[in-house]
Image (tube, grey):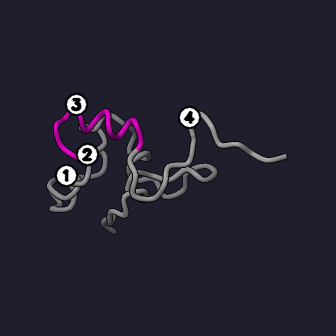
Amino acid sequence: MERNAKGRFKPIPQGRKTPKMLEVEKKLGCTLEEDFYKYYGDKKWGQKRLAKRWGVGRNLIFGKSLKGNRRSWTQMLNLPIRP
């Protein structure tokens, strides 16, 4: 049986953004990459505060082990995570 990927967890190609990410970017008026480097990259904010600004769970942005083939936003966009 061939599996046809449809619906909510449809695979997103590397470097592309999810509809939710695009929706929040439009609402905030900036991109995730800009906020990521401005606040998280400069060590002004932690993961929790950045996720709260974006209105999503911390695991969605920074999660390392999501179920199945799901990837976090930082994995999709190849953004570095602080140790």
The residue sitting at the bottom extreme is 83
Mark 1 or 3 closer to N-term? 3
Amino acid type assigned to the residue bearing label 1 in the image = Trp
Say which residue appears at 55% left-offset and 50% top-offset.
Answer: 70
Numbered label attached to residue 27: 3
SS under mark 1: loop
The image's mark for residue 45 is: 1
The residues tagged by marks 1 and 2 sit, at their Cα atoms, a distance apart of: 7 Å
Read off the magenta span. Answer: 18-31
Crowd around label 3: few <14 · some 14–19 · many ≥20 (10 Å): few
Q: Percent position (x, y) of residue 44?
A: 14, 55
- Cα separation between marks 2 and 4: 24 Å
Q: 22 or 66: nearer the eye? A: 22
Q: Which amino acid does label 4 sit on?
A: Arg
Q: How far across and down, in percent of the image, does residue 59 sit?
A: 44, 47
Q: Which of marks 3 and 4 is nearer the N terminus?
A: 4
**Sequence-wise first label, 1 or 4:** 4
Foreground mark, 2 or 3, reads 3
Q: Name the residue under label 4.
A: 8
> How many marks do you count on the picture?
4
Closest to the observer, 3 or 38: 3
Q: Which residue is drawn at 64% across and 51% down?
A: 68
Question: Where does residue 40 sit, x and y in percent of width and height?
Answer: 22, 56
